[in-house]
Amino acid sequence: MAAFLLRRLLQSIVLLGIVSIIGFTVLNLIPGGPLAQYALDPGMTEADRLRIASQMGLDRPLYVQYLEWASRMLQGDWGTSYRDGNAVLTVIARHVPATLLLMGSSTVIAVGVGTWIGIRGATHRNSALDYMSTVGAMIALSIPTFWFGLIGIYVFSLRLGWLPSGNMYTIGDGSVLNMLHHLIMPSVVLALVHIAIWSRFMRSATLDAISQEFVKTARAKGVPERRVVMKHVVGNALLPMISLAGVQVPSLLTGALVTETVFSWPGMGRLFLDSLSYSDYPVVMGLLMFSAILTIVANFIADVTVALVDPRIRLA
Amino acid sequence: MTAMTASLPPQTRWWQSRVVRRFTRNWLALLGLAMITLLTLACIFGPALLPYDSLYVDLRARFSAPLTGDHYLGTDPLGRDIAARLLMAGRISLMVGFFAMLLATLLGTLVGVIAGYSGGWVNAVLMRTVDGFLSFPTIFLLLALAVALQPTPVMITLIIALTGWMEVARIVEAEVRSLKEREFVMAGRMLGLSRTHIMFREILPNAMGPIIVAATLTVARAILLEAYVSFLGFGIQPPLPSWGNMLNGAQQYLGTAPWLAIIPGAAITIAVTSFNFIGDGLRDALDVRNDTL
Amino acid sequence: MTKDLKTQLSRRHALGMMGAGAAALFTPNLLGRPAFAQTPPDSPTGRVIVGLSQEPTVFNPLMPKIEVDDNVHFSIFDALFRIDATGEIVPNLATEVPTLENGGISEDGLEWRVRLREDVKWHDGEPFTAEDVKFTLELIVDPDFRAWRTSGHDLVRDITVVSPTEISWRMEEAFAPYLSFLTETFIVPEHILAAAENPNEAPFNQKPIGTGAFKWGERTAGDNLTLVANPDYHGDGPYIEELIFRYIPDMTVLFTQFQSGSIDVVGRSYITQDNYEAAQALPDRQVDLVPAPSVESIYLNLERPQFQDPAVRQALYHALDRASIIDVLYYGLPKATETFMPPQSMYYHDGLPSQEFNLDRAREILDEAGWMPGSDGVREKDGVRLEFTNSTTTGAHLREQTQQFVQQTFAEIGVRMNIENMPAAVMWGDHWVLSQFDTVMVGITYLIAADPDVTNRFHTDAIAAQGGNGSNTGQYSNPEVDALLEKGARTFDPEERKAIYREAQEIIRGELPFLPLFSYTQVYGRKAGLEGFVPNTNTRSETWNAASWYWS
């Protein structure tokens, strides 16, 4: 186990190194840079801009900037935001809760609804529901998330006026209810694709399990169908479910970025876009690294959990 | 060259006919195929048949709702015909999707075959790079690249391909790794065939099934990604229409001209759904294990 | 601290008159309303939520910042002077505005002397003195400090604290615009920042302490910023308890929140033009049209061979269908203009010849100048084709629409304009600053506060691409204009300056270094019960006088 952990750790560090080099190179290909936002300022001169660039260290060669960034990073210093002068980790930490809330609630929706549809489809194979859910899942996987969000805003905010069109809460109303009200639309929009994925997954997992001998045996013993399914199928599918949840993290993050944009949700996706358009490279790099770490950790936890729960899987 | 190569054609024909039979039994896949064919034909010939040019600005006709006069799908804020723009945009979006798929599949296959066949450190380096690309959300990388480079259709195609080859590489690598221990590869090696020959002439044709399926799904993915990037304003730039950039700015007119948002989004959904239907049908027909979904 | 009720009332009255005057200038529909019928409450009550489409993130007012940050700075800090809605400079931390007449500025414009208020306290209770002013002016030019603007400040020498309430300095050369610059130079506390190890990263920058009407409250990054009333404010007000800035990046969401009442004031970037009608129809909402200082134009890079021929610039100008652009694309809200000077400025030249949209005339000019259509219909002369790119920021929808509209009209006179838009960070980088563009569709604010000095935009020495120091990105160069601008910056008398800048405007209109489209009008919106709100286009802030706001 220890050897496995060590190996995964080393691999992850190499991986992060590669990610950081890709990210840093790409970002610095962008002409313009962080001073572009002052280009139209009537009172700032070219001398002002050159002075600020040199004070910020932007006039040094790229590899020097990368090495400095990397060595600080290794010491746990993620740098300072160009835009608001705070430590990058502080800036990210402020935006993480909103994104986690969104990702969490939509995962709950996706797993709940997806599991129900999947099991239902498998136990009632070739029923109308099974057929519709298969086709529905394919369509759900094909709808652009942001477009679904726009249609949602059009119908539920502009036409019906039932749900707010953006933000996380109304100022002056800090109640949980208010936040839930704001949370409904973004989390459903983000969940759609994942409902499709989960339902497809649960359907095939259930089908696999139903065909297995022990389920047949249990049924033969007269255990009610419902209990058989719940106990054996869900129990059996739990492990792959955990890995699937881990694998879903990057796609959830991508979805969150787009959803946050449509709904003015103050999370990491919104921060990424803002930082990108202000060329706040330290924050952009920080977010790239953060999401890479999140992905790696999620995969890692998924692997370890699976290994711990199921001793049959040898950690290779 | 050898008897084995010579025996391939009849084998292929049998393989094909069985696949075709299974594919045609899947009516969703057929529907997808039909829709894509229709859409492609419409995008190729449609613009010539419509009364308006996709770039013709007519401010007097701005914000016409669908079905006013000859504007079957209405007009945009500059009074341009949305039907004409939609079809021109379709050309671009479908081309971007198709070529991004082609490039991504080529690159992914190449990396996958080499990594899978070579093993050892070559495999380690290549597959860790694949992992590296996979460990941050595609859209982050995609946006950063789109900002860095001039967002022409060719560039967007390249960028999407560059962020979309890893899945194919993984699939091919796994497939090749399992194939390289099989008898026919051993035989090839004993006959003294070159590495390249074995990799691309012997192993690759046998891995075509999963590659074709992955390629179809990559088209769907590429069309979606183009839409994402263009919607966020970093993709293909107007006046050139693409399905994604027709949606960029539509949010502003959601209250007054909802069709600006509804129509291009529907086109994207139809195209992507069709490709997914086809991919699904192919997967069943080619007997590829369901491991991408 | 108790305020003398009488002075307070009279000051408020004066401010009310001023506000009403300004409102009358801008918004005829305000006239019917008794603007200041009610009196503000005795103690700060209520809360105002201002919706902003950009997020304020810079809280040290001397560091590089964008417009939206000014909203916070105007509320938390004071400058020596303030510029009011009519463009007049009035005292703020100073007791009077130095002029040649009152002796505050010497005859040669070199010696400056400013008297300060003695009743001002920092938010932490420390008294404000001349030392703070000296510290601020010195910090700005400190080479280690990441200061925002330094022009003007770099001319200041020999700062002397005469007494806690009086300060003097000498200017390296006479520079009239400096008075205006000082209205945007907020004074920071010496007792806090002088003690900081590195003022660039001081904790102060995240939790500023000023002398202004509002104190720092709480910030939820990415969402909102709350300021609270400063009960010890030396000036008028504040009458509201909390001033909240809410960041709502999407303009549609911003507007729907204004509709639903979640925000009280629509701040920068205001209500979009296409929503003006819908906004007017809203009950209990006050919607005003306010002229903005920025001028939209097609900026030409004069070093490109096509644009060196004045005939081409004239022809292109004739080919602009400005009426359609303004009336249709911009919903008739902006005003056509012929100059860089905003119409509300006292230096605006209203007698310039009006542009005429005439495609035949445009073709004629090009024919006469020898630009003849080539095989593909694009005109050319001596191997130079009338083909160029036009760029703007991606996602600026109205600008993108205008580009595509202009592209079509230009094509009709044999000019090919290719659209090549870029993300802001790319667009306004070297591409703009070092004049790597052909043409750009851009809205530019030329004036700093209300000072007419435009040396930075039109002087030959301001061409950064040619080694100059400034923002003359169109690379315009005219010795006559250079001389006028130099003279204007040395002249303090407003009447004399008027003549100088009128002449400069005439020359520039004649030469057309850029093609003016219109001068912007913004759609302001606020809830009807909010009194004391006065738009001030001489500042970059909607909340410049939030101290005087109150709910009726």
Image (cartoon, grey):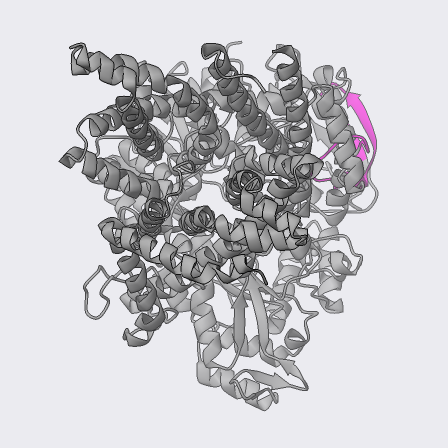
Nearest the viewer among A151 and C40 is A151
Nearest the viewer among A139 and B124 is B124
Q: Magenta stretch: residue C161 in it?
A: yes
* Vertical order, A217 against C74 (above or below): above
Quarter of the image for residue C527 reads top left
Residue range highlighted in magenta: C142-169
Question: What residue is shown at x 32% (from left), y 23% (from top)?
Answer: A111
Quarter of the image for residue A241 reads top left
Q: Magenta stretch: residue B73 in it?
A: no
Quarter of the image for residue C266 reads top left
Horizontal side of C266 relative to B31 (left or right) equals right
Q: Position of residue A273 (x, y in %)?
A: 52, 38
Q: Is residue B153 visible?
A: yes
Q: Position of residue C141 (x, y in %)?
A: 79, 34
* Vertical order, C526 against A217 (above or below): below
**Quarter of the picture holding the C terminus of chain B:** top left
> What is the count of numbered marks?
0
* Vertical order, B13 against C50 (above or below): below
Q: Position of residue B71 (x, y in %)?
A: 24, 67
Q: Position of residue C274 (x, y in %)?
A: 33, 51
Nearest the viewer among C365 and B104 is B104
Nearest the viewer among A124 and A263 is A124
Horizontal side of B25 relative to B12 (left or right) equals left
Question: What residue is shown at x 77% (from left), y 52% (from top)?
Answer: C469
Question: What residue is shown at x 51% (from left), y 62% (from top)?
Answer: B6
Horizontal side of A301 relative to A148 (left or right) equals right
**Quarter of the picture holding the N terminus of chain B:** bottom right
Q: Is residue B146 visible?
A: no
Question: What residue is shown at x 29% (from left), y 31% (from top)?
Answer: A164
